[in-house]
Image (tube, rainbow, N blue to C red):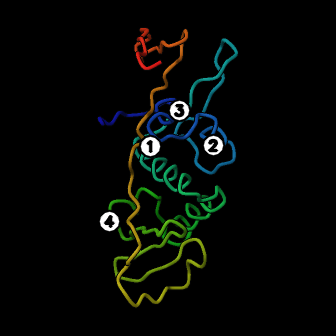
Amino acid sequence: MQLKSSYSAREVAALTGLSARQLQWWDDRRLFQSAVGPRPTAAGGFTERRYTPVDLLELTVLADLRRQGMTVSRLRLLLETLRSRFGIRLFDALGGNGSVTLLTDGREVYARTADGRFFNLLRDAEQPLLVIAAEPEWQELASRTHAARGRRKTGKKGKKKTREGKRKVDRTA
């Protein structure tokens, strides 16, 4: 994937698996705001929200956590805790190169600091955890784009439209 200077809400939705409506809802409720918000146009409509490459990477992680069942309120808590406790954005904790690395077991999100301390970001981010063994079931949070799925349209009986819109005879029908 080649990075662009900004992405439309439609492009972000296609790459993350989030819907355009989810992005709008997250923006309206200040969970995750677009870099460039919608603005009124002379024709009476609105311009499209625009997202930076950093926004896109963060949204792919948030979308993945959401698909794993994490609630929106927990996503908000995660973002707020990273800002208030560690003074960083989610992007700064991805990739393992920053002062904080994020790990998850699918239910909780943990921060591992550069000095080796662990914190549960969704419970008590001020209280370090005592970790006796290595992180057995924990995986580092990473940004993965969501593969867009093409939908097939069913036409007349026994025929399906391909993604290019051409009809293809289904010999099994």
Dot 2 surroundings within 10 Å: few (below 14), some, or many (20 or more)? some
Q: CA distance from mark 1 to mark 2?
A: 14 Å
Lower position in the chain sequence, tag 1 or tag 2: 2
Q: Which residue is mark 2?
A: 27
Q: Quadrant of residue 156?
A: top right
Q: Which residue is mark 1?
A: 56
Q: Is residue 82 above or below residue 12?
A: below
Q: Amino acid at mark 1?
A: Leu
Q: CA distance from mark 4 to mark 2?
A: 27 Å
The picture places residue 19, in percent across and down from the top left corner, at 58, 36
Q: CA distance from mark 3 to mark 4?
A: 28 Å
Lower position in the chain sequence, tag 2 or tag 3: 3
Q: CA distance from mark 1 to mark 4?
A: 18 Å
Residue at 38%, 48% (x, y): give it.
144
The picture places residue 10, in percent across and down from the top left corner, at 51, 29
Q: Quadrant of the N terminus?
A: top left
Q: Amino acid at mark 4?
A: Gly
Dot 1 surroundings within 10 Å: few (below 14), some, or many (20 or more)? many
